[in-house]
Amino acid sequence: MNTGFISGFALGFSLILAIGAQNAFVLRQGLRREHVFAICLTCALSDALLISAGVAGFGRLGAALPWFEPVMRFGGAAFLLAYGALSLRRAMTGGESLRSANGESTGLRKALLTVLAFTWLNPHVYLDTVVLVGSVSSQAESRLLFGLGAVLASFAFFFSLGYGARFLAPIFARPGAWRALDLCIGAVMWAIAVKLIWM
């Protein structure tokens, strides 16, 4: 197999492996078994677009539009602070379990808008996909195969996370597990928001 494809897959997978706002939301939707396919597909297609832009050479966008990075950074931080507050409120009030979570469905439109905001309002996603993947791809034997490898890594990761979450269902049948998850999600959201503000 082409080394460019393998390198692209390895880099792409490593960049999205760390827990972040988007991954936490995908995990939560997977546990709730709610719009999992649509959420995973939206994340993977968004990554595919950004990776393609990076491989095509759009990594110099920040230099061309100096206002772009701070607008995305502070907009993303505001969104993360708000969503983190909702998660922390759920953790404090408690009472959610897998059974009750499945009974209170979030609409598809709201879920998609939320995951799109997590994806496109996060300035780190541009640094990771457009800038980093784009710059590394220029040194690959084949930019196309490198990009395909990175795109495939995104599809593999998001669908594994979304559909693999159901194996944790016995743990999340208890309300205490949901409180812990919401507490972790809220803390992650706020930590990322603070990092965005002070970077």
Image (cartoon, helix red, strand yellow):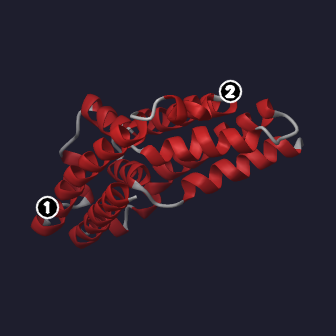
Helix, strand, or loop for circle 2? loop
Q: Residue at x 40, y 44 (%)?
A: 122
- Residue 197: percent from the left, percent from the top? 32, 56
Q: Residue at x 79, y 33 (%)?
A: 143
Q: Judge depth for marks 2 and 1 and give the one in front.
A: 2
Can you identify the residue that label 2 sits on?
56
| Image position of 150 (left or right of 173) | right
| Image position of 177 (left or right of 46) | left
Which quarter of the rendering shows the N terminus?
top right
Local crowd size for mark 2, using a 10 Å CA cut-off: few (<14), some (14–19), many (≥20): some
Local crowd size for mark 1, using a 10 Å CA cut-off: few (<14), some (14–19), many (≥20): some
What's the residue type where badge 2 is placed?
Ala
- Residue 102: percent from the left, percent from the top? 25, 48
Q: Residue at x 27, y 58 (%)?
A: 98
- Residue 161: percent from the left, percent from the top? 50, 52
* Residue 32 in sight: yes
Can you identify the residue that label 1 sits on?
89
Which quarter of the rendering shows the C terminus?
bottom left
Q: Residue at x 64, y 52 (%)?
A: 13
What's the residue type where badge 1 is placed?
Arg
- Residue 176: percent from the left, percent from the top? 23, 73
The answer to which image quadrant residue 24 occupies is bottom left
Q: Which mark is residue 165?
A: none
Helix, strand, or loop for circle 1? helix
Mark 2 to mark 1 CA distance (whole Å): 42 Å
Q: Identify whether 141 is placed above or below 29.
A: above
Point out the tag, 2 or 1, that comes first from the N-terminus: 2
| Image position of 17 (left or right of 70) | right
